[in-house]
């Protein structure tokens, strides 16, 4: 084993951890977005949880955040504007990442 091999393994392990963290943070962000949107739509309890799940699954349509944004923009058209949705997406991404880091 060389120092180069050790360094390479460390980078690979870090890449894998970062990828997993990003996936978890994105899924949690989407759930938090769903809960936020459900509250704006007047949903609570099981209805709110069910709606949040639809937001999470909407992220599987295509890579990136635009599929989630389009769903929220459509569902919240008469409740809030696009800039608010986008800023909430950014803020909740930070919140989700912090929550996950604090769990470990």
Image (spheres, rainbow, N blue to C red):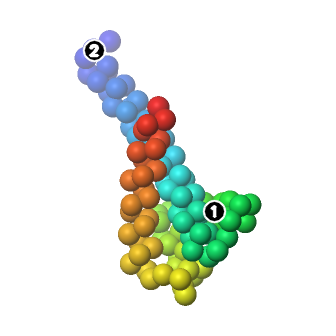
Local secondary structure at mark 2: loop
The residue located at (48%, 81%) in the rendering is 80
Q: Quadrant of the N terminus?
A: top left
Q: Is residue 93 above or below residue 14?
A: below
The residue located at (44%, 83%) in the rendering is 81
Distance Cα–Cα, label 2 vs label 1: 49 Å
Of labels 2 and 1, earlier in sequence is: 2
The residue located at (68%, 65%) in the rendering is 44
Give left or right: position of 20 versus 37: left
Residue position for label 2: 2
- 98 or 21, nearer to the observer: 98
Local secondary structure at mark 1: helix
Q: Is residue 80 above or below residue 2?
A: below
- 15 or 70, nearer to the observer: 70
Q: How many marks?
A: 2
In the image, residue 83 lies at what x, y percent? 38, 78
The residue located at (54%, 58%) in the rendering is 32
Mark 1: give few (<14), some (14-19) or many (20+) Cα within 10 Å: many
Residue 6 visible to the viewer: yes
Q: Quadrant of residue 90?
A: bottom left
Q: Residue furthest bottom?
A: 78
- 60 or 29, nearer to the observer: 29
Give left or right: position of 10 versus 85: left
Q: Quadrant of residue 58?
A: bottom right
Circle on res. 52:
1
């Amino acid at each position: 084993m060389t120092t180069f091999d050790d360094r390479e393994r460390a980078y690979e392990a870090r890449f894998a951890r970062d990828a997993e963290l990003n996936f978890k943070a994105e899924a949690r962000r989407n759930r938090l977005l769903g809960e936020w949107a459900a509250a704006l739509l007047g949903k609570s309890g099981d209805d709110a949880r069910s709606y949040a799940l639809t937001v999470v699954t909407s992220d599987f349509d295509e890579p990136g955040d635009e599929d989630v944004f389009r769903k929220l923009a459509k569902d919240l058209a008469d409740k809030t504007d696009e800039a608010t949705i986008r800023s909430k997406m950014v803020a909740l991404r930070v919140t989700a990442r912090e929550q996950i880091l604090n769990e470990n």
